[in-house]
Amino acid sequence: MIVPNKWGFPDLGLGVGLRTVHYDHILKKRPRVDWFEVLSENYMDTDGRPMRILEQVAARYPVALHGVSLSIGSTDPLDFEYLKKLKRLAEKVQAQWLGDHVCWTGVAGRNGHDLLPVPLNEETLKHIVKRIRTVQDFLERPLILENASTYVTFANSTMPEQEFIARMSEDADCGLLLDVNNVYVSCRNHDWDPWAYLEGIPYHRVTQIHLAGHTDNGTHCIDTHNARVVDEVWKYYAEVHRRTGGRATLLEWDADIPSFPEVHAEVLKAKKFRREAMKRERAAR
Amino acid sequence: MSARRGSGDEGRKVRGSAPRRGRGSEAAPGRIEGLVFAGHPGGLPRVQASRPRAPLRAGLDAVENWMQAVITDPGGVAAGERSTEARRHIDRGAGTIEQVILPSRQQSSRERLQVYANAYYWRLIDILAEEYPVVRHATGPRRFSRLAVEYLQTHPSRSYSLNFLSIAFPAFLRSGAKQLPRRDFLADVATVERTMEDVFDAPDVKPITPKAWRKIPMSAWMSKRLKMTPAMRLLELGYPVNGYLSDVREGKNVKPPPKEKQRIIIFRRNYSVWRAPLTPIRFKLLSLLQSGSTLPEAFGACAALKGFDAEKFTGALKGWFRGWASDGLFCGVD
């Protein structure tokens, strides 16, 4: 059964992550892209050319903000200066929503600028839920949190990641950004069942979907965002689409970035999987 | 005058959301001298994967502090595990890593944790290299990486933004780095590179228009202060690095210049960053205006300079001001 989004956030269609190498193409050619996702931290402390370009993009396309420094899982205090800037930026570009990751980036005042995993247990859950509520109160809107790719699991974890994410989003009343490539990467790395993972997601909270490529090192996968989406990830995407009936979908490509038309063409492949998924859904009814 | 960036050439500022983990995968072992970047396989001491001796009762705060200490140790995760900082948070003796991190079917606990450890230094060294390409050229990539590691150990990032990671790098080169030949020269180069970053991101204030200039009566100039754009910096350096930076950026193989004082201006015009050398008198004049002197005060201070030539000064003033105005250096009058 198709589950609508709890907050009525729109399905923005098929979008692309805004990257510097594509600025000129986007401004000159005005490609017919449904929407853009913008990395919040890259625009919070600049009033130079990046901000002027973002203003032009935001005037023409729907924009969502996606952060990497909220560090919702850290035991350090929340950084309210950061949150103030985030809120200001969101207002400036009229962001559709604000996303970040279920992770921590540093502790003891330090920042490693990585998306680090948390032990999946009751203590962490309680801690993160409390912080999400505080952040949402401050930002006056729901946070949309993403399942990160992870490379370790902890001996003191007590529940599967999908259960952690489901309980977290229910208890904190936040939204989810389901990264289906991260589902693939984490499941490969930790010998988890991806279909069980997808089964456990509360789809009424899913607001956005991420697609990306990764690097397969044989013993483990790394979420490098430097390649096309693999077939297995497209299968997960189709399944998520079947369950949701359509959520804003975004392709991330961050290394070895090809031309804009090539990146855009990659996300447009989602149309085919969307059609097939809906056919299956109709047949099942 | 040299342009630092034209349109579409400011890639550093936009980072993707996938944290860099080496170059596509983990770093190869020993690629940075002085660091044990123990890649896989072979670089890591094999500790038998074992079941926790007793359930791990460490709280979230202990796990995070422990993990941070282990993955940021430049000696690799084995050295990190033995470090005082890591043991302050979780210490279960030899094989603590195996007590905290579970193995997968394909990788040991150590190999898995090393993915994060490798990524930490590679990612941040890459950022420093992007921000200081000319320092890197001058030191060579190996010495630069060693300097970067030393810098990161003494100045770990404490901000949500990578923009501030390298803010203390010039000062570190001048007085903090160990055994660094030509440190003052390198520090001057780094100062210029860092200042260009700051100017690139500085607040955007519209320059005063020619029409607005004309509206100001002559009599008012005696008491008014010119407001300078915040996207401008003036630097006084011990080495003439301006031309060196341009040459290196153009791919020329040049030697570092001999010591000689140089004054330069770095400013932003149409969202590109520019820099140019300044004569002592122009530097003095702009510095005084930037610090809030009125025109008569600034002219008076210039007149006190050794070798001041009043006729030459007066003759050149109009041209200087016209050039500075067209470069957008003035944004108002108080």
Image (spheres, grey):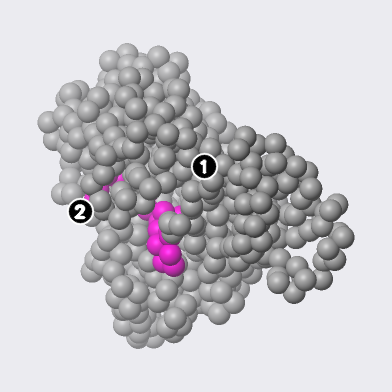
**SS assignment at label 1:** strand
Residue B301 at x, y percent in the picture: 72, 39
Residue B90: name its quadrant.
top left
Residue B248 visible in the displayed image: yes
Who is closer to the viewer here, B207 or A73?
A: B207
Q: How many marks?
A: 2
Relative image position of residue B2 (x, y in whole percent)? 43, 57
Establish if A265 lies above or below A168.
Answer: below
Q: Is residue A164 left or right of residue B327?
A: left
Q: Nearer the viewer, residue B207 or A244?
A: B207
Which segment did they paint magenta? B5-24
Asked if residue A218 is among those painted magenta in the image, a careful observer would answer no
Amino acid identity at mark 2: Asp
Name the amino acid type tagged 1: Arg
Chief secondary structure of the magenta portion = loop
Q: CA distance from mark 1 to mark 2?
A: 51 Å
Subunit under mark 1 = B
Which residue position is annotated with label 2? A216
Q: Quadrant of the C terminus of chain B?
A: bottom right
Q: Residue at (32%, 50%) from the top-left corner?
A: B247
Read off the residue under disc 1: B263
The quadrant in which residue A285 appears is bottom left
B186 to the left or right of B280: left
The image quadrant that residue B322 belongs to is bottom right
Q: Does residue B332 appear to the left or right of B185 in the view shown?
A: right
Query: Which residue is located at x 86 percent, y 59 percent?
Result: B220
